[in-house]
Amino acid sequence: MSGGVRLDKWLWAARFFKTRGLARDAIDGGKIHINGVKAKPSKVVTPGIEIEISRGQTDMVVIVRDVREDRRPASEAQLLYEETAESIVKRETERDLNRFSRAGFQPADHRPNKRERRQMTKLKGIFND
């Protein structure tokens, strides 16, 4: 298909979102930008444009390679876009930083007792002042 497709349909077909409704909500929420400009769900996507996608803590910049209106298997959906090299490096760096920030965390093996809760409250009070 050499023409264009609605942005919400393309995001759904490329498997960035599970439903068109979720794609539309992300677009309306300002999480999707086309060539640096906030997009609308009815914006026509054509090959060659750059789309910035923010999902949770993950940001991606992809270049549209092909357009489809129907949802195909993930292996075919990955052929619809190409992620930029800068986006890949940034995403991997953020993933590593997030993983390393949790490296030393050891969850407690029990619920805090009364004494431990009081100590936590006291500690929180010190940092909140």
Image (tube, rainbow, N blue to C red):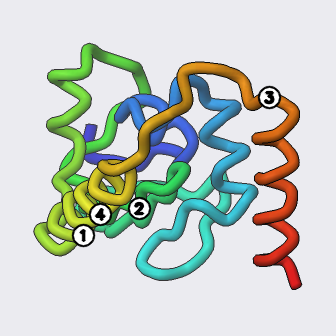
Q: Which residue is mark 3?
A: 113
Q: On the image, numbered disc 2 is attached to which residue?
A: 59
Q: Nearer the viewer, residue 74 or 71?
A: 74
Which mark lies nearer to you, 1 or 3? 3
Q: Nearer the viewer, residue 51 or 98?
A: 98
Q: Earlier in the sequence, mark 4 or mark 1?
A: 1
Q: Secondary structure at mark 4?
A: helix
Q: Describe the element under mark 2 as helix, strand or loop.
A: strand
* Image coords of residue 104 (percent x, y): 34, 50
Q: Is residue 5 left or right of residue 91?
A: right
Callout 1 amino acid:
Lys
Observer-nearest of 4 and 84: 84
Residue 29 in sight in this render: yes
In the image, which is nearer the foreground, mark 2 or mark 3? 3
Q: Which mark is residue 97?
A: 4
Disc 4 to disc 3, C-alpha distance: 33 Å
Which dot, 4 or 1, sits closer to the camera? Answer: 4
Mark 2 or mark 4, whichever is nearer to me = 4
In the rendered image, the vertical position of residue 92 relative to residue 38, given as above or below:
above
